[in-house]
Every structure is written in structure tokens, then in C-alpha cells.
Amino acid sequence: MSKKTWIIFVAAVVVLFGGLIFLSNKSKIDVSQVDTNKINPASVQSGDIADHVFGKADSKVVVIEYGDFQCPTCGSVYPNMKTVTDKYKDQIAFVFRNFPITTIHPNARAAAAAVEAAGLQDKYWDMYNRLYQAQTQWSSLSATDRTSYFDAAAKDLGLNLDTFNTDIASDKVNQKISYDQAVAKKINVTGTPTVYMNGKVVELDTLNDSGKLDSVVSAELTAKGIALPATTAK
């Protein structure tokens, strides 16, 4: 190799590695300025998709769950979470953030994408409930069969199927899931479900007991001066 050829080769390698570093840095999600205890608005980093909120978005009591749709424990606490969030929907804000653990739940990220895609057609909570309520029906399916299952669920919910499938594979949905994961990792979330209420962890034994969960939520509402629902207030 001549000296001139060698110089050209080295220059090309430098440009190539420089480009790879640039793309790598560009793809990194910076959540250093994100307040993990507050409801996050849509941003470029989150794929222009905001936190999904069930209930009273401006409540002083914010419950945030980091969950995995294929996680059996998430599935087991889901009924309690739904019962309590339904009961206090006019008093609290409930946010669900994606934390699929694909090393043990190979269908988890695909499920998260299906729910986010449904959200782009204003059916986020409908698909969220559908997948948790029927978790055992799809959690062990092959990639092909799970796609068929999610398509059938989308059709049942009245979604535009072509748009749904386009959105599942879109950069914005992928970015939203990765953003949620980055937010979770900022506060050292390692497993699911991990639930915070106003920045304080709600222990698993509480999540597993609807009575205990109801009690801690009602206590927090009372502490914040928020009136309980008429059927609960004493």
C-alpha cells in the first residue's frame, strides 16, 4: 500500500468512526433534567408522545407505575391497581411507564409497542386493559402469533389496522418505550412492577392487597387535603 493510499485509508476510517460516534451520541436519551415524579410532556426524546395519564392530570397525588405487560407479577397486581385507580380517578393521576424486561419476557416490548400504537388512535387505556386482562393468552405466543393476536385486539377496539401496524414499527413508538426505560433507569428501577406515589415507593405487599393499596392512596389524598369520593368519605 502506497503512502498516499494509506493516508486515504486512515482518513476514511477516522470519518467512519467519527460518524458512528456521532450517531451513537445522537441516539442517546438524556433524562438528566427530567423530574421523574412529575407527568412528562411530549418531547423529541419521547417520540413526541407524552406520559399517558388516567384520572385527574393536575392532581397533587401522582401514582406512577413502571411495568412490563408480560410480567406475571404486574399481571397479578393489575386488578388491584385498576380497582383503586378507577375508584379515585377524580382525585389522583395514574401514569404507566414502559419497562419491558425482554431478557425474560420476549413479548414485552412488542406488547408495549401495541399499547403505544393504540394510544396514537386514542385507545391507550383500552389496549392497556385488554393486554393485562388477557395476559396469559398472548404472553407465550411466537412472534408471528403475537402479531396476529395484537391485530385482532386492535380490530376489536375499532382501530385502523394499517395505521396501527405502521405505528407499532415506527421510530416514535420505539423512542417512547426507550425514553420510559431511560427515565426508569435514572431512579434505578430494576424490576416490575415498581410503583411510586408522590416519589415514595409503594411496596409490593401493598400492591398485592387491594385493601392496603386503597388505604395508602386514601391516606395520601387526606394528607394533601383532597376530599375522598363520597362513597369513601366518613
Image (cartoon, grey):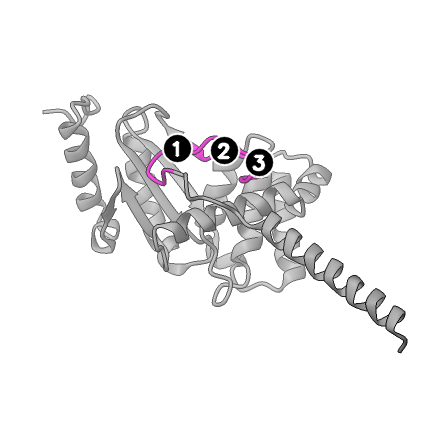
Which percent across, then down, holds residue 217? 21, 37
Within 10 angstroms of label 1, few (less than 14), some, or many (20 or more) residues?
many
At 31% from the left and 47% from the top, the residue drawn is 195
Task: Locate the N terminus and report the quarter of the image it occupies.
Answer: bottom right
Type of amino acid at the residue the image marks with label 3:
Val
Q: Are marks 1 and 2 in contact (CB under 8 Å)?
A: yes
At 28% from the left and 31% from the top, the residue drawn is 87
Is residue 118 inside the magenta stretch?
no
Cα separation between marks 1 and 3: 16 Å
SS category of the residue bearing label 2: loop
Going from N to C along the chain, the mark reached first, 1 or 2, is 1
Main secondary-structure element of the magenta-colored stretch: loop
Residue 84: give its label: none
Highlighted range, magenta: 35-53
Within 10 angstroms of label 3, few (less than 14), some, or many (20 or more) residues?
few
Q: Which residue is mark 1?
A: 39
At 39% from the left and 48% from the top, the residue drawn is 66
Relative to 142, is 74 above or below?
above
Is residue 48 inside the magenta stretch?
yes
Q: Is residue 55 left or right of residue 107?
A: left
Q: Which residue is mark 2?
A: 50
Cα separation between marks 3 and 2: 10 Å
Residue 129 lies in quadrant: top left
Q: Is residue 180 left or right of residue 15?
A: left
Q: Which residue is mark 3?
A: 44
Going from N to C along the chain, the mark reached first, 3 or 2, is 3
Which percent across, then down, holds residue 94? 35, 35
Type of amino acid at the residue the image marks with label 1:
Ile
Task: Locate the C terminus and report the quarter of the image it occupies.
Answer: top left
Relative to 117, is 104 above or below?
below
